[in-house]
Amino acid sequence: MPITLNSSTGITVNGVTLIGASTTDTLTNKTLVAAVLSGTATGTYTLGGTPTITAPILSGTATGTYTLGGTPTFESAITSSVRGTVTIDNDGSFDMNVTNNFKCTPTGAFALTFTNITAGQSGNIILVNNSNYAITAAATTKVASTALATISATGTYWLTYYSPDGTTVYVANTGTLA
């Protein structure tokens, strides 16, 4: 499917390029299809009207600044299930850039901490406290003191978290799970 819309070597698809001879292109009332199958697409794109952006990026990268006018529609080419990975992190400090699902089996007391806090991110932690390890919370982690007392006891707990603002993480928990 080699698509080539020239004007001094602009757009292309299977040969990658994606838009043109310059690093800034303006498209009005057009559909930008970033079908990057491999390679790199970079630049600044200003889309006016009511653009539709379809970006099935399978490998490679597409970077740049996209300024959208009108009421843009984003279409996804995801055709299979999307699942988060589970990261084992036993020190009680959860890096939100790594994943959103964690399993923690501490080997000592710790302060429940989140790093690289991202606004809008939520996730889960399975906490397996095998020895009544005391669990406190970092200043940016908001959790009920009764929840901290609960998860400091031996047991398995499911914690959920959410950051509404990129600076604070709110945590809720279940009781001991059988």
Image (cartoon, rainbow, N blue to C red):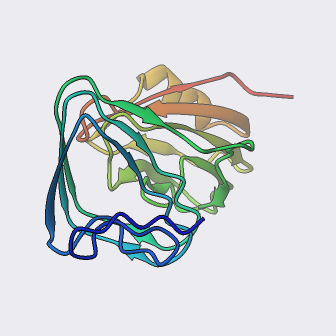
**Where residue 66 sits: x, y (%)?**
21, 50
What's the residue at 71%, 43% (across, down)? 79
Camera-nearest residue between 146 and 116: 116
Against 103, is 17 above or below? Answer: below
| Quarter of the rendering containing residue 118 | top left
Against 72, is 4 above or below? Answer: below
- Seen in the image, is 164 located left or right of residue 66? right
**Where residue 52 sits: x, y (%)?**
38, 35
| Quarter of the rendering containing residue 116 | bottom left
| Quadrant holding the C terminus | top right
Against 3, is 38 above or below? Answer: below
- Seen in the image, is 162 located left or right of residue 25? right
What's the residue at 23%, 62% (across, down)? 64
Against 66, is 147 above or below? Answer: above
**Where residue 135 sits: x, y (%)?**
50, 44
Camera-nearest residue between 114 and 8: 8
